[in-house]
Image: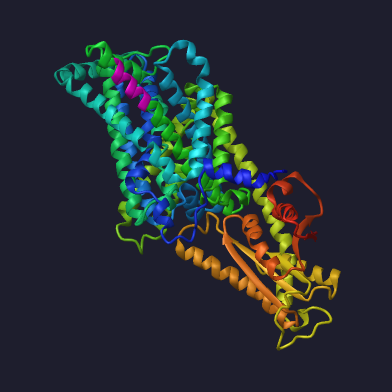
Amino acid sequence: MKIEINPIKIFNWLKTLVIGGARNPFDAGIFQKISLIAFFAWVGLGADSLSSCCYGPAEAFISLKNHPYLSIFVALATAFTIFVISASYSQIIELFPSGGGGYLVASKLLSPTFGMISGCALLIDYVLTIAISIASGADALFSFLPPEWIQYKLAFAAIGVLILILLNLRGVKESVSILAPVFLIFVLTHLFLILYAVITHLLDLPKVAANVTYDVTSAYSEIGIIGMFVLILRAYSMGAGTYTGIEAVSNAMSILREPRVETGKRTMKYMAISLSVAVIGLMFAYFLYEVVPCEGKTLNAVVLEAMTANWGENISRIFISVTLISEAAILFVAAQTGFLGGPRVLANMALDKWFPTRFALLSDRLMTKNGIFMMGISALILLFFTRGSVQLLVVLYSISVFITFILSQLGMVRHWWITRVKVEQWKKKLFINGIGLVLTIFILISMIIAKFQEGGWITLFITVLLILAVVVIKNHYKRVAKMLERLDSLVQVSKTPEGGIPGRQIEAAVPECEPKAKTAILLVNGYNGLGLHTLFSVIRLFGNTFKNFVFLQVGVIDAGVFKGAAELQRLQIKVKKEVDAYVNFMRSHGYPSEGYLAIGTDVVEETVKMAPQIVERFPQAIFFGGQLIFQEYSILSAWLDNYLVFAMQRRFYYQGVPFVILPVRVI
């Protein structure tokens, strides 16, 4: 007995097993099911900034070298900056409740070009977020593992990225829910660490104050007031990765529970308070226990050993292990921010044709799967390029995001000034975003100065390369749009009495389709020049062979549509109107005609699903699809332009259904 193996069915079974079954976008409660309340948003989005406590404060503290007590000024300045940036982004959330973050803010309030620059910088930062979070997590985990295991650290980090890719392909809520217990363990262990360090050293506060005074005096006498300021500034900039998760809420508003603005602002509040407490608390713990860097261990591991030195060996080992494992785990959770925010920025830019349009498409799990793959693969490349070195990644990290911060704050300042007559309390709003603008400019300049020669130039170079690449993509889409304008002239012609089908008279009454007659089924994507050109080609090439004409269109639910039930309803109405336009046109010229439509995330899958029922009704049917053919073939056009018709043809052939591709030349 011969067993037939269907590779498509096997692939779909494996995909469902690993990622989960398809979701119904028309489920009345789908947006409720996949959205996040403030707590889970804090876990999924706030973990990025909170996890920076595993390396940000430590890098700042170490950079102060022989003047550790100056870290108190760095800690206070960092906390102040956190609250300013959080307050300014809360105003962005109010103005842009549907999300979009730095890309949308700069695009709408400054210009599309500034928006593109902001989006590119943010994408670089999100890739670095994933890379540095995973690398730091591996560092924390291997801090208490046997030294001979260190050779497996990079492989472990790579596996971590792959696991997160799979989790995010399943869905946002699923990935965050799984990681929430880890987040809570991290918060509780580090809150205990901070409280224990402060409470047990309350009697030492006079000594701490004396040490701060001594460090200030010593630094002043050694390097002068300017040198001391530069030293503090450099430490402040080395810890700038602390701020990078703050903007993530405004980018991911679409996944927050209604009312989104209130949920977003509550999430921002949770982030600001927890992050400020963590940064100040850890800085205090470092100088209270007078820790110094130790080879092969993170500074947090060193302070934990000092703190638990008198607890007894077993208790000390257990607490240190739990805390460091929670650090490693939350750093993996922090990489979630890159997977949550990055694909959404990519999708928004793809909708505006800065990136290939495929990045705006959703999977059957209603996730932007191409964006998830893009962010994960880019992070893997970066990990292998840097060999998972946190020291190098910290230098590369956080520069790009401040470009986005600056453009966002500048756009908001401009908005409040332009609308000052209409907006109440505009001076207060302008002041908040103005302070944010000044601070972010100051931080960016200081970071470039401090990090440029150490490797910061690499981040700027990659950002410039990405900007140039998306400009090339945008220009390609503009050229294609101009070419398609010539085809779209057929739409206007078809609406005139002279614009009919040669040899056919306009008729008032048209008979119904004859199911057993030869039928041409045309796949269309809107009532446009491409569809009409394909239709006229069928009539020109086959004459009166076909008695019936059937039009099939799939409305694509992409990231631009999947924002609410109202958007889905508008899509349905639009698609039906376009299909009806073809049907009415053919009937007006005496051809029996019908229309079919479907709404889904995948054009090929939806078309293949509908084909059997259409073929059952019209057994003598042949499917037709039009394909744009450019005068000159290029790798860019092959990558960017839609070649779905070839994928459909392969699937139809597998089912034994005839499918003809008609070339539509664009000059």
Q: Residue at x 77, y 60 (%)?
A: 658
Q: Quadrant of residue 528?
A: bottom right
Foreground residue, 62 or 529? Answer: 529
Q: Quadrant of the C terminus?
A: bottom right
Q: Is residue 117 visible?
A: no
Q: Quadrant of residue 192?
A: top left
User: Is 139 rendered above or below residue 173?
Assistant: above
Q: Is residue 628 visible?
A: yes
Most distant residue in the left direction = 203
Report x, y in % for residue 95.
39, 56
Q: Quadrant of the N terminus?
A: top right
Q: Residue at x 30, y 42 (%)?
A: 270
Number of numbered discs visible in the structure rendering = 0
Most distant residue in the bottom direction = 508
Report x, y in % for residue 435.
35, 43
| Left or right: 399 as drawn, with respect to 622 | left
| Left or right: 271 as drawn, with respect to 645 | left
Report x, y in % for residue 352.
58, 54
Report x, y in % for residue 613.
65, 66
The secondary structure making up most of the magenta span is helix
- Which span of residues is magenta-colored? 317-326
Q: Quadrant of residue 205?
A: top left
